[in-house]
Structures are given as structure tokens and as C-alpha cells.
Image (cartoon, rainbow, N blue to C red):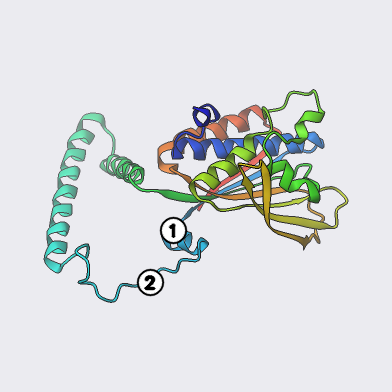
Amino acid sequence: ENKTIAGFDTPAKSLYTSVRELVENSLDAAERVGVLPDVNVTLEEISLERFQKLYGVEATERIDKGLYKDVETEKERTARMKKQKQARDKAEREAKKKAAKTGESVEDILRRQEAGRKAAATKSRRVFYRLTCKDNGSGMPSDDIPNMLGRVLSSTKYNSVMQTRGKFGLGAKMVLIWSQMRVAQPMEVKSAVSGQGFVSFHRFNIDLHKNAPIVREHRKLQNPGNWRGTEISVVIEGNFGSYKQKLLKYLKLIAIITPYASFDFRFV
């Protein structure tokens, strides 16, 4: 029930909510220091091989291909290719009939049907993404980063009576909790405040029982350009195909209501 209220009840909705929470945190951070927000969001689908490497599991090639029955024989491959061709021919015939009635091009109809099939296919398998959100906001003090993002109900927003987009300091923390529940990979944060001659890098999880951050790595990186802001990167389970249109609509709407902000969204 709590996950549903927070917007993390399904992988597809959780991906949408994660993007939204991080984007709105970035807008708040920029407006807090009186600069025009510059928000960059990157969503990268992670292959199974790369995902396994995150856990130290190397993909290997099967030597004895006859050991299991899941290996496709040449006869089975020929039958599958024939069946797929028949399905494509049937879809093309139906698309031509529909195009004759609606005036839409056959290519557009087939492209839309293929997109629908791909979206349906992703529902039956787990898909993982690396979500990265970078801004030019206020940044976070180096020593406070683990507590600000890795401790529930700990936030910088409590020292102000001004209403912001966030609610109770749970946005980025819920993203981390969802990641930990489904992927168990730490969040990576780079941040720098004004006058800080370095960029602080943290990798950490959250101990849900003790409500405390577990810092895996902390380094001070060079900051030759005197960059100020925050970059959060987290691996999460999601389904971009199911919520693509809703996510893009949200980004368009947030750009309309904040015309002074710059947004860059990339799916790679």
C-alpha cells in the first residue's frame, strides 16, 4: 500500500516516478540559489551481460550446446523463420487493407504495430536502466550527502517554510529504496557547492532497519571548471516501453510551466 501511494508499485510506474522526483529535486535546487535551472536526464537500458557484471558475474559461452533442450536445432530454426515470415505477410496484408480505409501509410501502421509488440514483450521480462540526473543547483555539502539522501525523513527542506515541489524529503530516498529492493545496487552521487574546490563522490546504500546510510565509497574529485550542482545516478528496474508516452508528456508539461528552465532528456 505504501509503495502504491509513493508511486513505486510497478516497474513501469516506478521508472516514471523516479525521473519525476529527481527532475523536481533539481528544479528546487537551482531555484534555491536563484539560477536558471539546467537539468540533464539520461536513461540508459542495461544489457543482461552488463547487469551481470555489476554483480561480478561474467557471461560465458556454452560449450556443450546439446546439454540442455533450450538450444534450437536447424529444423526448429527453419520452422520458426517460416512461421515468422507468414506472420509478417499477414500483418502486411492487414495493414494494406487498413491503409485503404484510413489513408494512413502502410509503413506507419506496421511501425506502430511493431512498437506495440516490443512494448508487450518487455512486460514479460525484467528490464533494468541506469537513470542519471544532473543539475546546476545548490549542490550538497560533502559530509552531509549520505544523510541527506540515505536517511529517511532527513532533508534540507525542513529549514524553510516555503512550499517546494517535494513533499517530505522522500523523493530521492524512495528512488534509492526502490533500487535497493529490486536491484541492490548503490546510488552514486557527485556534488559540489559554491566555493568548493573539489567534487564530492559518494557510493552508498541505505540500511532500512537502522534508517542509516551505508557508505561504500567516498572520494574527492578534481573540479577544474568550478562546477556547482548535483549528479545522481542509480540503477533501477523499469519498463520504458509502457510509460514512454506518459514520461515524455510529463517532460513537455514541466518544460511549459517552467519556461525559464533548460531540459535535456536522452534515452540511450
- What residue is disc 2 on? 60
Viewer-side residue, 135 vs 153: 153
Q: Amino acid at mark 2?
A: Thr
Dot 2, crowdedness within 10 Å: few (<14), some or many (≥20)?
few
Secondary structure at badge 2 equals: loop
Instruction: Tally the numbered discs.
Output: 2
Residue 183 coordinates in the image, percent (x, y): 50, 50
Q: Where 13 sits versus 63, above or below?
A: above
Residue 112 coordinates in the image, percent (x, y): 32, 40
Residue located 29% across and 43% down the image = 117
Task: Give the left or right position of residue 207, taking residue 32 as reference.
Answer: left
Residue located 63% across and 41% down the image = 263
Secondary structure at badge 1 equals: loop
Q: Which mark is residue 91?
A: none
Residue 194 coordinates in the image, percent (x, y): 85, 48
- What residue is disc 1 on? 47
